[in-house]
């Protein structure tokens, strides 16, 4: 209940910093952040990504350094994405099943360097490994086959779990893959390996710089609209989340982030489960472009957008600004 003015003056509690701190409803800490990192071949390599200013691909040794840095900053989890060498990409993406692929070497190196002081989340989808850049196997017409792809994703998940992944994060949007992967993980004894499902993932225009980063943008013909969701749909997102939870997802993700905070809120209210959001590459690039154009202050934009995710109901956020934000939050 709010009484009439002047008995009620909402500016009263805003008048001083101490009072604003006391009345703050939402907090953001480094523990809310997941840091996505791009892995590349070689040793001692740092390869800047032009469309993501400030973000680089790192060779496995550099990834281990970033992992130590993240743990020291209080970031609880990393998300890994490989830039697979062109000669290891194929029509069927079989490199995803290689126990010595870039992803598996990065996982093992991080676990050797950091143990359980940081979690490793790994993306499950075939786009970094296919010669056509789609997330799954395609037929002669280029249609991404659901059930045949799920069989490969099971193998990819087991491969990542065997290398030491803590969280399997399927980003492919095939139907039925969460249950199939959960069964396989249980069968292989990986009972505590989590699944964070990219449950509501939209066919978005905000993924462009990511596709540059993993090297699939030049390969991809067409789009991903037969499996990723239509940005017009919200009820369908709730159905996607409901199915993935029923199949055994431990947490769910909404992606992209800021343009889809209504989906975050609806999922949180409908299911009361851990919800994460991915502030994707195009969102990062937009902030950096605004800063470069003198249209805003980086630190303030980063902290305000990340706080917005928390306010909308997120347990945490995947963001390329994670290390920078953690440094700001740690003072
Ligand atoms: C691949 C995948 C994508 C992203 C995460 N996993 C791209 C896509 O679906 O084309 C995008 C992340 C970003 O833009 O930062 N399955």
Image (cartoon, rainbow, N blue to C red):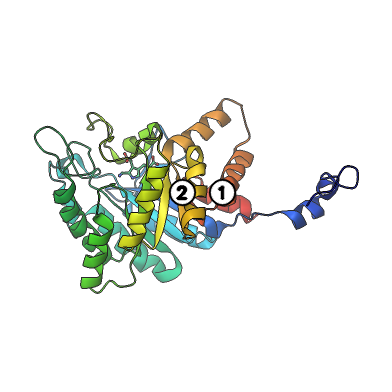
327 or 273: which is nearer to us?
A: 273
Residue 15 horizontal side relative to residue 323, left or right: right
Assess disc 1: are there few (<14), some (14-19) or many (≥20) residues with their C-alpha within 10 Å of its C-alpha.
some
Q: Are marks 2 and 1 in contact (CB under 8 Å)?
A: yes
Per the model, the C-alpha gap separating discs 2 and 1 is 10 Å
Residue at image coords 43%, 55%: 66
Kind of element beneath mark 2: strand
Q: Is mark 2 within 8 Å of ligand 1?
A: no
x, y percentage for residue 54? 47, 39
Asked whether the viewer can see residue 100, the reply is no
Residue at 90%, 47% (x, y): give it.
Answer: 7
Q: Is residue 278 above or below residue 30?
A: above
**Vertical side of 167 occupied by 281: above or below:** above
Q: Position of residue 269 (x, y in %)?
A: 52, 54
Q: Is residue 297 above or below residue 310?
A: above
At a point 30% along the width and 73% down the height, the residue shown is 191
Q: Mark on residue 312?
A: 1
The picture places residue 314, in percent across and down from the top left corner, at: 52, 53
Rendering quarter of residue 305: top right
Q: Looking at the image, which is closer to me, 113 or 310? A: 310
For ligand 1, the image quadrant comes to top left
The earlier-in-sequence mark between 2 and 1 is 2
- Residue at mark 2: 277
Residue projecting furthest to the top: 293
Residue 26 visible? The answer is yes
Q: Horizontal placement of 19 versus 166: left or right?
A: right
């Amino acid at each position: 209940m709010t009484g009439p003015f002047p008995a009620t003056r909402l500016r009263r509690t805003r008048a001083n910093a101490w009072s604003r701190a006391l009345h703050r409803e939402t907090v953001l800490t480094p523990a809310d952040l997941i840091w996505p990192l791009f892995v590349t071949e070689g040793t001692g390599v740092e390869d800047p990504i032009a469309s993501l200013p400030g973000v680089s691909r790192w060779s496995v040794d550099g990834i281990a350094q970033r992992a130590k840095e993240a743990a020291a900053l209080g970031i609880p989890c990393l998300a890994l994405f490989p830039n697979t060498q062109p000669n290891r990409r194929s029509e069927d993406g079989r490199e995803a099943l290689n126990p010595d692929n870039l992803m598996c070497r990065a996982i093992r190196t991080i676990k050797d360097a950091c143990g359980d002081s940081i979690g490793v989340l790994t993306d499950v989808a075939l786009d970094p490994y296919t010669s056509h850049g789609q997330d799954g196997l395609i037929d002669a017409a280029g249609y991404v086959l659901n059930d045949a792809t799920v069989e490969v994703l099971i193998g990819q998940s087991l491969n990542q779990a065997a290398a030491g992944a803590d969280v399997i994060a399927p980003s492919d949007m095939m139907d039925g893959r969460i249950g199939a992967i959960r069964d396989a993980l249980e069968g292989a004894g990986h009972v505590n390996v989590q699944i964070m499902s990219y449950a509501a993932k939209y066919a978005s225009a905000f993924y462009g710089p990511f596709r540059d980063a993993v090297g699939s943008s030049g390969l991809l013909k067409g789009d991903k609209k037969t499996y990723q969701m239509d940005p017009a749909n919200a009820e369908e997102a709730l159905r996607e989340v409901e199915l993935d939870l029923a199949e055994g997802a431990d947490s769910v993700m909404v992606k992209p982030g800021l343009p889809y905070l209504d989906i975050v809120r609806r999922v949180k209210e409908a299911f009361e489960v851990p919800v994460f959001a991915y502030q994707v590459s195009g969102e990062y690039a937009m902030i950096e472009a605004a800063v470069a154009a003198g249209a805003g202050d980086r630190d303030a934009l980063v902290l305000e957008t990340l706080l917005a995710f928390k306010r909308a109901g997120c347990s945490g956020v995947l963001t390329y600004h994670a290390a920078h934000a953690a440094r700001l939050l740690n003072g």
